[in-house]
Image (spheres, grey):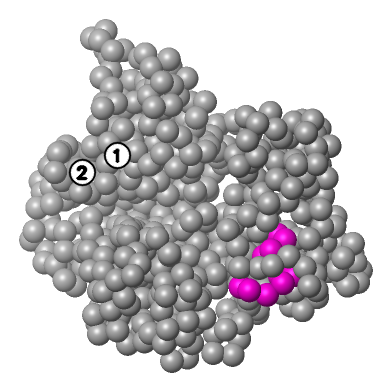
Amino acid sequence: MIKLEPVLKDYLWGGERLKTLFGRKRDGIVAESWEASVHRDGESRVEGSDKTFSEYLKETPGAVDKNGGEFPVLIKYIDAAKSLSVQVHPGDEYAKKYERDNGKTEAWYIVAATPGAGIYCGFKRDVSREEFLEKVKDGTVEELLNFIPVKKGDCYLIKAGTVHAIGEGCLVCEVQQSSDVTYRVYDYNRRLFDGKLRPLHVEKAVEVIDFKAFRDETDGGEPEEIPGGTIRRLTECKYFRMRELKLDGRFVGTDDDSFTAISFISGSGEINGKKFAAGDSFFVSCGEKYEIDGEATAILTSESKAAYYLGIDIGGTSVKCGVVDGYGRIIASGSCPTRNGAGAEAILADIAELAKSIIKKADVAVSGAGVGCPGTINTRDGEVVYSNNLAWKDVPIVSNLERALGMPVFVTNDANAAALGEYVCGAGKKYNSMVMLTLGTGVGGGVVADGKLFEGNKGAGAELGHEVICYGGEKCTCGRRGCLEAYASATALVRQARRAMDKAPGSLLWKLTDGNKDNVNGKIVFDALRRDDKTAKAVVKKYVGYLATGIANAINVFRPEAIVLGGGICNAGDVFLKPLAKAVNCEVYGGTGFAPVDIVVASLGSDAGLVGAAALAFGKR
């Protein structure tokens, strides 16, 4: 074990807290204190020695991990007396190609925060490149950003490609990839000490920014009791693992697979007989035992222990494939066209090639794979019994892909996969049982009961879109009549609106569709409803009634804790969801007399099927 001496950095937004709280000695402000670093832009040193940290590691083979790997992170403190610039970091591929450096995924642990302090993480909503550039140009880019108020002890994972900024008043312990590549996009017109504006890097930034709405993938845990205190998982990603240790006594630790970097946030005591105080940082070699005795809070950083899985989501027009970690986070992904008419063998060959390329891109060991496929699936034997979308019959998909990929493969219906995805890390995460309905071209259904995916006999169950809600009613795409899908899909809503328009020539719907009813869609129907159009109100009321009947039937059979709704219709918000909840309560057996069933909107969007497919392999490898 060694104690590390930090490298201090002076930037114009820095403050005094690193001096007052951690005893850093420097004239003027201290913006950053690089605690554990082997990066060329600032190396830590070994206390009581003339060696740099990297020199020590070279002389100590196996100190980082048992495979002799390189130190993968840079650990620092950041004192934001003023807000940092709005910026983004590139991923590995771009950084190595253009900057000769690593990409930069990072995590922020809030050591202290003044009242009202916060951070900016990603966008509030999906944003176009053009809109972003316009906001940067006129100095209003913060209007697009997702502001999160923070307090002491919070932790957030900031993936490469996420636009972000640390706000004024935050003192942060940052664990990041060993990199110093930052692309600033907005800096409040601040000037350097020589009077010049700090340079921006907008052209490079737009090449690496993820313009989708921010989704928090930190996935921390609850504190667990251990001898001498508690330990809490803060976050874990491909590059590192962070835990918070709160100690009031004695703790003994070791890691046979990785180093442990210990950053003492507060308190005092002894570690392996050596005194420590707040702000001290230590490096413990792989396999080395360490003993802490005292009252303190510390951040423990080590190599990631995350497992990785492959998710394959087969659609009628394209196949999506991604490597997903055990927390449901997508590490790398891609897609290819579904060559309809080419035959199952050719399509599966395409899928195998795509999967291999994504695994190579992710650069991690993959333990198993899962597949979500449209149609009737025999999950026990790993076969697609019949898929109308793909024109497949009796296709042994599991054995075929296992031969091609050399790993265990599992398969389920695509709607089941989407439901499992939402259950594992989406809107259904906090529930033990849920029913998912996806309202699109059709109505897809998926059921998770007591933590397990319900698939029915040979995987043919949970066809909730084909429960009959009106005997002899509308003809369904399946050939039968009266199915929920024929009344509650997005397609059905549009059909109902067009019929209503024929009977209401004065409806606002005609104006919103430029006089052509073929232009009507779900968004237009709800826009007209918000503007008090009687025809749209009647259409939505009837549609909500049909959907409520189907949901009530599902509740009566499964009695889940939640109904999760997916599809673009859900973007209508409360004007749709509130009357739906009221109608369901009127239809369900027992009304509100039983435990209430939450109706929530799916959160993973088009990624649900991919994540859920990968989740089939969780724990089954």
Indicate the secondary structure of the residue bearing disc 1.
helix
Residue at 32% x, 77% y: name it. 344
Which circle marks residue 550 in the picture? none
Q: Position of residue 17 (x, y in %)?
A: 43, 31
| Residue depicted at x 37% and y 24% | 133
Name the foreground residue: 344 vs 593: 344
Can residue 542 be seen from the camera position used here? Answer: yes
Above or below: residue 226 compared with residue 5: below
- Taking the spot 16% from the left edge, 71% from the top edge, the residue there is 67
User: Secondary structure of the magenta portion, mostly?
Assistant: loop
Tag 1 near tag 2, CB within 8 Å: yes
Q: Nearer the viewer, residue 546 or 163?
A: 546
Q: Secondary structure at mark 2?
A: helix
Cα gap from disc 1 to disc 2, whole angstroms? 8 Å
Examine the structure image and report whether residue 261 is included in the region drawn in magenta.
no
Residue holding disc 1 = 208
**In the figure, is residue 117 to the left or right of 621?**
right
Which quadrant is home to the N terminus? bottom left
Residue type at mark 2: give it. Tyr
Determine whether 20 is above or below 563 in the image.
Answer: above
Mark 1: give few (<14), some (14-19) or many (20+) Cα within 10 Å: some
From the image, which quarter does the C terminus lie in? Answer: bottom left
Relative to 138, 60 lies left or right? left
**Disc 2: which residue:** 94
- Is residue 339 depicted above or below 480 in this figure? above
Q: Residues within 10 Å of mark 2 (few under 14, many from 20)?
A: some
- Rendering coords of residue 590 (x, y %): 91, 71
The magenta region covers: 478-488
Q: Is residue 296 left or right of residue 602?
A: left
Residue type at mark 1: give it.
Answer: Val
* 230 or 443, nearer to the observer: 443
Q: Earlier in the sequence, mark 1 or mark 2?
A: 2
